[in-house]
Amino acid sequence: MATVIAGPARVRPFTVLDIVIGIELFLLIVIASRTYTFFPFLPVSLLNRLSFVIPIACLPLVLVRHPYAGVATIGILAIVLSYQYWFASLWGTQFTGSGIGSYQALLLAPLAALLSARFPASRFVRIFFAAAVVHLFVYLLLYLTLDVNMIRQQAMSGDRDLQGAIRRTHEAAASTSIEYSDFKIGTSGAAMSFVVLYAISHLYGIRRLLPRLGMAVLAALSLYGMWVSDSRWNTASTLVALVLLAIPMGSRARAWLGFSTAALAAAIWIAAASAPFNPFSLSSDRSGSARALEFEAANPVLRHTLPLGIGLPNQDGDLEAVFSENVFIGDLGYYGDLLTTGLIGVALVVLAFWLIARFIGDLARTEPNERLARFLSAYLVYLAVVQIITPQLTSGIGGVFLSLAIAYLGRRGAVAPPPSPPALVVDLAPPEAGPAMLPRRLVGAGPTNEGDPAAE
């Protein structure tokens, strides 16, 4: 009879790669939330270039060491650029390829693949969590220190004598046709939902009081941030994921439920595009009415370009060559994907959800930290629901998780963590000789608890 006394949890210090990934993820969140508007020293053109250059610079090394991730990234680049070229050739606009900046989250597979060589997937997820928490505090700081009502009143009265961040905010609002009366501080709903679901899914597995209290506070602050940001659909999608997180079911089943939701929603939007029915007309509020008008303007065009869609615009103003009225594709979710990339593009979106669900299924079988798979499965449900209106997977922060799935699915062995330091095995059987029972041997222990907050 032998008793295993587990060895100490392996403490993995931050590496340069961790820092690079953290900076990249934070840049993506800042760009998606338009938080850069409040910081004059952060021009968006510089942020876009930097967030694009970081993963692309890793491509040569990744193609040698992790060809699957490198080839997949090149494939995604080729698909996006092909659709941009298709738009330019179909509507007579200029092909610049600059629109690739909206899809940077889909290009992180090289960074994730480099991380997978030494660390489990939980490492990448925890770095994203840290970046999302920083964004949460930045948003709350802006919300609690800026007088939003004053900004509205000054803008509506035509007062342009505003300094610094407030002036730039007004200019950004004017350039994107946002009504000043509707001004609100931008945020990344996907990042806030990430904090809520991660904190709650890890809450009950933490044994120590202070870390548990910290997770509870972060979840509460993120829920408060979503509430004050007035992002109703994002909040509703998060609540759906939280309900399914509370239901006792396996992570694999929850992940496949998320995939099924995405596939069903895509099928419904395809049917709506070919039927005389406007799904957005079911909503009577202001945003629903605006989306209903966009649907009415876009659907006649889509019916003539259904297989490949109208293509992806290269720059602001390109859609004016297609529609006589304002159509904001980012407001149309799966229908926006269908409009721009056609049936082929929607099939690729559903395939992306399938890849993430398969990655989570593999993770649930091989990762000893069950909370990670439980969290990712709940977040996949969130992405599937929020995609109905907001394309978070294709042109939002959700694309990060497709990159993560591509990187780790290509390295089956890297999904599971590397072994931890040896554990002490003490033989408790009666000794053959001598009065004392001494440790007999040292053996390798099981998987490390890297990423397990309970062990920290």
Image (cartoon, grey):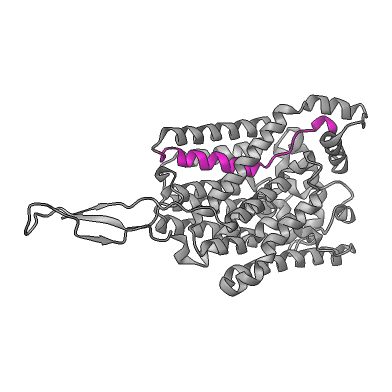
Q: Main secondary structure of the magenta part?
A: helix
Q: Position of residue 260 (x, y in %)?
A: 54, 53
Q: Residue at x 50, y 67 (%)?
A: 411
Q: Quadrant of the C terminus?
A: top left
Q: Is residue 178 left or right of residue 334?
A: right
In this view, 135 is above or below 446: above
Residue at horizontal 9 percent and vertical 54 percent from the top: 430
Above or below, 394 relative to 234: below
Residue in front for this viewpoint, 311 or 210: 210
Residue at 15% x, 53% y: name it: 428
Q: Is 237 on the left or on the right of 95, as rendered?
A: left
Q: Is residue 268 visible?
A: no
How many marks the image carries: the answer is 0
Visible residue check, residue 225:
yes
Whole-percent x, y for residue 377 in the image:
50, 49
Q: Quadrant of residue 166?
A: top right
Q: Nearer the viewer, residue 107 or 431?
A: 431
Q: Is residue 188 magenta?
A: yes
In the rendering, at what x and y percent does residue 440 appear? 19, 59
Location of the N terminus (image quadrant): bottom left
Q: Which residues are magenta?
A: 179-206
- Is 53 or 226 nearer to us in this picture? 53
Q: Inspect the magenta stretch and tell me whether residue 338 lies in it.
A: no
* Viewer-side residue, 390 vs 104: 104
Vertical order, 195 against 300 (above or below): above
Question: Residue 156: image x %, image y %?
Answer: 89, 28
